[in-house]
Image (cartoon, rainbow, N blue to C red):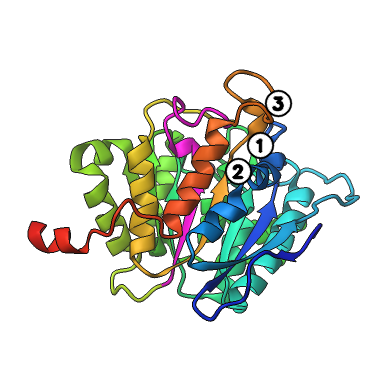
Amino acid sequence: MTSVSNTSNQSPLLRPLTILGAGLSIGQPHPGVESAPETMRRHGLLSVIEKLSSWQVNDAGDLDFDKELPVCSLTPGQINNVLEAAYATRKIADATEAIAKRGDFCLTLGGDHSMAAGSIYGLLKAIPDLSVIWVDAHGDFNTPLTTPSGNFHGMPVAALTGVFDLSAYPGFEYYQALLPPERIALVGVRSLDREELELLQQKGILVFTMSEIDRYGIGKVMTAALKRVNPMGVNRLHLSFDIDALDPAIAPSTGTKVPGGLTYREAHYIAEAMAETGMLVSMDVVEVNPALRPDGSFDDTTTADPTVLMAIELIESALGKRIAPSLLIEDLIQ
Ligand SMILES: [Mn+2]
């Protein structure tokens, strides 16, 4: 941890929330994604959350993943940087477990999406009934045997649900798959490898692709996804939000762009629907890469990166920001 600060006065009316920077980048090939947590802070993330007047914000700073590790021998199939991934995953998991055990909302900022193999693993150790909505252009359901690239950010859902045994890989001996497949649903997907799709179907993991969103609308899709992962309405919820779920036209600074993504409002609706459950206890925001700015510049002091601003706005929606309360309208519509 590089810094610890408590930026608001303690109040019994405010819910505690801890921001954890997990700028992991070894799960994919593009440098820059590690700088997202600091860039989001510089663009006012903390004050934006405090303005919601619901949260007592604590910033746990950024985890440090630098460690001398031996060069790893070949593993069955391929996980690139496997020892670094194992070390970082454990560090992230220990941090999120501690935050959740304190009872804080845990907001983890990536980093690439491989960090969620750690964040959600740690959260599940503290909150065994946690259910997950995974918003993503991709399935993130490859295994070391099916991956075309060896990039760990394409495997976290498979690791979490135990479709392959991550603990068999060097450094990951500690790891356990703690997430039952029926407690995760994927939303916004539009790019799946063939074997990834077969494995998702075998495991019975529900995938709400962009087609379902086109056909039924995001409202019905979120109702169905939440019903699937939380049928009795009693489970606590985690939102893992990959910024590449949004259409690249509105969130271009990310490493693995796929056309035909979520609109601005669809993305916000997902975050709002999660907040409205009253059960959301944690969130990851990942794959924001400020080094991949649409204009090719690295200077974010003169013009703000639209993708960074989008990520901050989505966090606001997930933490309760509303255009207006909709309670009276709901009575009329139903
Ligand atoms: Mn992802």
Labels 3, 2: front one: 3
Image quadrant containing the C terminus: bottom left
Q: CA distance from mark 3 to mark 1?
A: 23 Å
Marks 3 and 2 in Cβ contact (< 8 Å): no
| Observer-nearest of 302 and 180 | 302
Looking at numbered disc 3 in the image, what kind of residue is underneath it? Asp
Would residue 162 be visible to someone looking at this image? no
For disc 1, does the CB lie below 8 Å from ligand 1?
no
Looking at numbered disc 2 in the image, what kind of residue is underneath it? His
Q: Which residue is mark 2?
A: 153
Looking at numbered disc 1 in the image, what kind of residue is underneath it? Gln
Would residue 310 be visible to someone looking at this image? yes
Could you say where residue 243 lies in the image, as x and y percent from the top left? Answer: 50, 40
Could you say where residue 90 lies in the image, as x and y percent from the top left? Answer: 72, 62
Q: In the image, which residues are magenta?
A: 236-254
- How many discs appear? 3
Q: CA distance from mark 1 to mark 2?
A: 6 Å
Q: Residues within 10 Å of mark 3 (few under 14, many from 20)?
A: few
Q: Quadrant of residue 230?
A: bottom left
Element marked by disc 2: helix
Q: Quadrant of residue 87?
A: bottom right
For disc 2, does the CB lie below 8 Å from ligand 1?
yes
Could you say where residue 95 lies in the image, as x and y percent from the top left? Answer: 69, 66
Element marked by disc 1: loop
Q: Which residue is mark 3?
A: 299
In the rendered view, would you say 264 is above or below 206?
above
x 38%, y 46%: residue: 268
| Observer-nearest of 20 and 164 | 20
x 33%, y 40%: residue: 265
